[in-house]
Amino acid sequence: MKIIVCGAGQVGWQIARHLSGEANEVTVVDNNPALVRRAADTLDVMGITGFASHPHVLEAAGAADADMLIAATHSDEVNMVTCQVAHSVFNVTRKIARLREQTYLEPQYATLFTRANMPIDVVISPEREVSRAALKRLMYSSTFDVEEFLDGRGQLLGLALDADCPVLNTPLRQLTELFSTLRATVVGVRRGKRLFAPEPMDQLFEGDAIYVFVELSDTARTLEIFGKPAPDLRRVVIVGAGNVGLSVAQLLEARPERIRMKMIERSRERAEAAADALERTIVLRGDGMDSDLLTEAEVARADAILVVTDDDKTNMLVPVRAKALGCPLSIALINDPSLVELARPLGIDAYINPRATTVSSILRHVRHGRVRSVYSIGENEAEVIEAQVLSTSPLSGQRVRDIDFPEGALLAGILRKAQFIRPMGETRLEDGDVVVIFTLSGDVAAVEHLLQVAVEYF
């Protein structure tokens, strides 16, 4: 496909990096020459300097014969106008826009982004995506990562293995035999700085960070087996009352189980707005780094603290202080990916990377053929792909053991007529099955070839 990516910041660069590595013809547009130069020098893309909303800039980027445009600049309004120009002047078929302002997404304006008004096919809201990710981290706070697949029937869980993990030093093949009814598969292992797809005889060791794909109803049992039982979430402290913090609090208030919440916010204006918007949450105004304020928020009695301010240093240091005061679990929003490696040494139990979350959301709508969902892991290290098996695919009718998967790919789960199937060597794939495949980034193209994706899908 020919794709134009507008915006060469962190999100735009990462999207271009993914797509250019998959034989797509990618052009990156940004008004910052340095960012354009970085993209052109480090990626297999063409770079255009200028404002993406200007028709002559889009023309220079090849909009006349582009299959898709992704507007991910820092300005919502530029992203919207860019999509409008791409549609009205160049008739670009598919347009995706990243919008931060929540007002645009309110129900009363639902007709705004339609072909007759503002022709945007897919709107991505980073704040909403991050809020959902934060809620998942809270619900599964013994994990460092969690994502849903197969219409909610399957989950990818990230687990950091401690010394008390009951299944350390056990070959994965033996785990399959010990827990024969457990519908869970270890699909990825991070050991040190290396991420790999494990072999049946590989063992797990203390310090490993693993990715397990599990059927939803077996989640609790899986967590127990790996020494990570899900805690009973009754009390939560949230630091930061911005869009993300407020949204998470509202989602928690809407849940059937009653969760007691306290929120800390430094800004008087945001604190007052949060107090007005929330029904059962107590809002405290002050600095989350203040030990006295954390004590007033009863952080020692909380089951978890979620820190989602707009400052990474605050987000990483508040959990340290909260855990020193007795809070057992901490979750932090970390914008700068270079700081992620400090999370575990600081005792942060789980983190949310907004860039990775947004990139994964956009990539779900970019892939062609029967690919239904894509989740990005780490810094472009691996992907988890959900796709439907085509009747003409090399997968259809084949036993799993006979499929020529690349070395860095593993079949994680199968959904057949609403039934979850844990893939085994003798499992035969059928036309219409929905499969989930874990694959290292270098093997993505080979996996998509197996799925026989086609541009004609559009």
Image: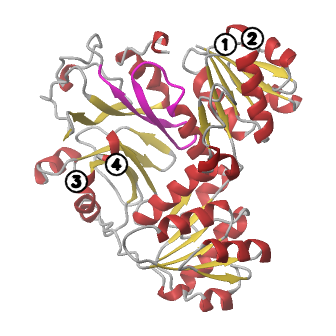
| Labelled pair 2, 1 in contact (Cβ < 8 Å) | yes
Tell me the element at label 3.
loop
What residue is at 29 percent from the left and 30 percent from the top? 434
Q: Position of residue 260 (x, y in %)?
A: 47, 81
Mark 3 residue type: Thr
Q: Name the residue under label 2.
A: 62
Q: Distance between the residues labelled 3 and 2?
A: 54 Å
- Of the residues tagged 4 and 1, which is closer to the observer? 1
Would you name the residue on which mark 3 appears?
Answer: 170
Looking at the rendered structure, the kind of residue marked 4 is Gln
* Residues drawn in magenta: 364-389
Q: Is residue 172 left or right of residue 61?
A: left
In what element is the residue under mark 4? strand
Which residue lies under the disc numbered 1? 66
Residue on which disc 4 sits: 155
Nearer mark to the viewer, of 3 and 2? 2
383 in magenta: yes
